[in-house]
Image (tube, rainbow, N blue to C red):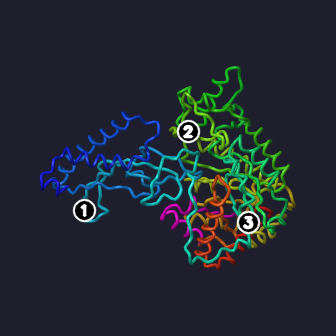
Amino acid sequence: MKSIETIGMAKDPFGKALARQIYDDFAPFIVDEATREDKQKLLKGFTELCDEAYDLRLLMRKSKINYECLSLSRGITVEGNDRWADVFGELEGTQSGRNAVVLTLFGVLVAQTGNSRNDLRILEKGQIINSTIENIAPRTTVKMCMCDHQQEAAPEPLPDNAEPFPWHVGVFDAHNHIGERVNSVSDLPNMRSRALAIMATRTQDQPLIASIVKTHGVKGPQCFAKDKTTVIAGYGRHPWFSHELFDDSLETPTYVPSGDVEAAKAQHYKAVLSPAPTDPTFWRDLPVPIALSIFIAETRARLIEDRYAMVGEIGLDKPFRLPMQWTDPRPEPLPDRTPGGRQRRPLSQHRINIAHQKVVFMAHLRLAGELGRPVSVHGVQVHGILYDTLTESWKGHELRGRRSREKEKKEGKAEQPTGDAPKPYPPRICLHSFSGKSDAVKQYLKPFIPAKIFFSFSKTNNMRSDEERKKAEDAIKIVPENRILVESDLHTAGERMDSELEEMYRVICEVKGWGLGEGVGKIAGNYREFVFG
């Protein structure tokens, strides 16, 4: 800008040249349906913006105050940086829901108030494009993702000098969603991984997973010793779809069946969503809610039919927002996608109340305890609430130390034998794609906790930025060697799933200081314990 001002370069050609550069940068985001007039309008808007920026920058340079325009680094998490920028738009991404910056549209206008770079006053917040696309990294071309959660990507090649990976020891995926892409099930026989745990999320994918298990399901611990890929089913209601259930144990449920179905739906969705929707077209496309007791009964039946099935994916999610209602004409369903998902729709402002999510979550925990099944738990921006909810599930069943037992004996309190009576909490819990800090790990290692807590890590969610990787590595260092698992959290079986599992195994072994054979063997033992007990 200083050079432009010095040589007296005209504002108009400068603005046009910069606008063209910005337009070219945005080209990957322009939808195919955009007309020539749409594109010209966009270019004109960029040109006007550059003209205004030119004038503003010259004023800033002539001011005695040290103004600066900052850009948020690509790949950093949005959470915790909301004081710097607002989200202007969002690309679709992974199942995790953890947001990262893709692009800074408008920088953060700041004024330096002291001698340090930290002495900054925010005058105008920036605007960003964010996404949950995995592995956002600098200098990566990002195209508008048109799938439910994930972009397809080729596996990244490992260095030529990488130590050969010991597939023969047995590699296991603790959490994935291949029920979302049923066509990819045909790739199972070609995989190198030994077993995959497939998680259900909503009404439509429960029977699909049951059908996959009939062909590829694990028959017992001995299956893990065979050179064949088997699957373990997970049945349950993901927190993203918990609004589709109503708590029929309440004296006055949020949904009361009546002749006016739309009015009954409106009452329910206004009660469980925040902010409460006011547009009838929003709840028009939402399903008629199902009684929680009915869904739990159906899940119980599936678990009883499959003795090795677990409960999942269940949990709590604070930032998740529902998709917008369908627009007319409604697009044709995608043939390779399981119905009931987002399918290209932008997100609305409506979130599911945590109190309602908790009711659904607790019902699943009780079911898992009743049948003695492990659970796979989802938690995003709710580490404290999640821990408190799990603690509530085992309240009164905490393990007592030797001193407590001796004290009760002296006081004449008889120890009540519990035997094999059902518990209200799951015996084994996997915190999937664990995103907490090392202090959060320590919470779950307290000796009085009666459930065995496992921590699972994935490349998709835990390695997508330097910040996330550092946090995951710090947590991995703290996790006991007999409580660590690996997952993909992907929606398609095949080469990519094998590749991402291998990469995560390598990271864990490096952080733990294990040889690959040693580490893969330890994690295989952990997986057996988590699944079979």
Residue 99 at x, y percent in the picture: 50, 52
Q: CA distance from mark 2 to mark 3?
A: 35 Å
Which structural element holds mark 2? loop
Q: Which mark is residue 323?
A: 2
SS label for mark 3: helix
Which residue in the protein does label 1 denote? 114
For the stretch drawn in magenta, what is the main secondary structure?
helix
| Residue topped by disc 3 | 527
Point out the residue furthest to the front here: 36
When asked about the image quadrant of residue 205, the answer is top right
Q: Bounds of the magenta span? A: 452-476
Secondary structure, mark 1, is loop
**Residue pictured at 40% horizontal, 46% vertical:** 27
Q: Residues within 10 Å of mark 3 (few under 14, many from 20)?
A: many
Give the residue type that dot 3 points to. Tyr
Mark 2 or mark 1, whichever is nearer to me: 2
Task: Tell me which numbered mark, 1 or 3, is placed earlier along the sequence.
Answer: 1
